[in-house]
Image: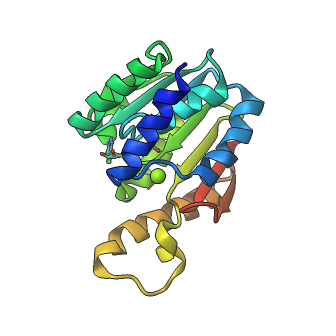
Amino acid sequence: MNLDVLEKVKKKALDEHIPIIMDETLEIIKEYLEKEKPNRILEIGTAVGYSASQFVRLAGNQVKIDTIELDENRANEAIENIKNIGISENINVIIGNAVDILPTLSKTYDVVFIDANKGKYPVFLKEAIRMSHKGTIIFADNILYKGYVLSDYNKHKQRTAVRHLREYIADSIENENLNTQILKVGDGLAISIVK
Ligand code: SAH
Ligand code: MG
C-alpha cells in the first residue's frame, strides 16, 4: 500500500477539519489490531477513508473492512483515496445511513469501530453486539465528547448527544456479556470485548 498517499489523505482531512481518528487513539487500537490480526472489521463512519486505511496497514493484508458513510461526497472521496492507496481489495465502502444499513448486514465481525453520529451510539452498540462473536472487540470513538460527557453542565446543543453517549457507556458497562473499559485517550475511547 502507498503510505505517502495515506499521509496526504490525512493532511487534507486535517486541513478540511474532517474529524479523523486522533494519533493517540489509533495507537491504542493498533495494539489490538497487531495482536488479533482480525479478518473482518466493521466501521461506522468512513469519512474520507483515513481510519479504514490505517486499519488495513495495522491489521495486515488479510483484513476485509465493511465501512458505512452517510455523506455521498465523502464516501466517493473515500473510494478514490482507497483506490489511490492501493487497498480497494480490502475495503468495501457502503453509502447510506448506518441506522438503515446495519440491520441488512448479517456477517459477524472480529472488530467494530463506531465513529459516526453520537445520537445513535446505543443503536450502533446493539447492532455491533448482534454481529459479534466471542472475542469481538467493539471500539467507540469520541465517547467522552470533549469532556462534556463527564461534565454536569452542557449546552442545549450538546445535550442529546451527551445523553446518548452516557447511555452507551451505561449499556456497555452493565452488559454482562461485555468487558468494557472507557479510556480518556483522545476524545475518549470505549473498548468492549465480547465474552
Ligand atoms: N472514521 C473516520 C472519521 C469519521 S467522521 C476517520 O477516523 O477517518 C464521522 C463520519 O460519520 C462523517 O463523515 C459523517 O458523515 C458520518 N456519519 C454520521 N452519521 C452517520 C450515519 N448515521 N451513518 C453513516 N455515516 C454517518
Ligand atoms: Mg472520531
Q: Quadrant of the N terminus?
A: top right
Residue furthest to the top in view is: 89
| Above or below, comparing residue 21 to residue 181 in the picture | above
Specify whether residue 155 is in view.
Answer: yes
**Left or right: 137 as drawn, with respect to 160:** right
Q: Residue at x 33, y 82 (%)?
A: 155
**Left or right: 33 as drawn, with respect to 106:** right
Q: Residue at x 65, y 61 (%)?
A: 182
Q: Estimate the x, y position of residue 83 in percent, counting from the top left.
A: 39, 18
Q: Quadrant of the C terminus?
A: top right
| Above or below, comparing residue 7 to residue 168 in the picture | above
Q: Estimate the x, y position of residue 103 in percent, counting from the top left.
A: 37, 33
Residue 173 sits in quarter? bottom right
Specify whether residue 18 is in view.
Answer: no
Q: Residue at x 43, y 53 (%)?
A: 121
Q: Estimate the x, y position of residue 130 in percent, counting from the top left.
A: 52, 36
Q: Nearer the viewer, residue 121 or 82?
A: 82
**Left or right: 106 as drawn, with respect to 139:** left
The colour scheme used to paint the residues is rainbow
Q: Nearer the viewer, residue 19 or 67?
A: 19
Residue furthest to the right in view is: 35
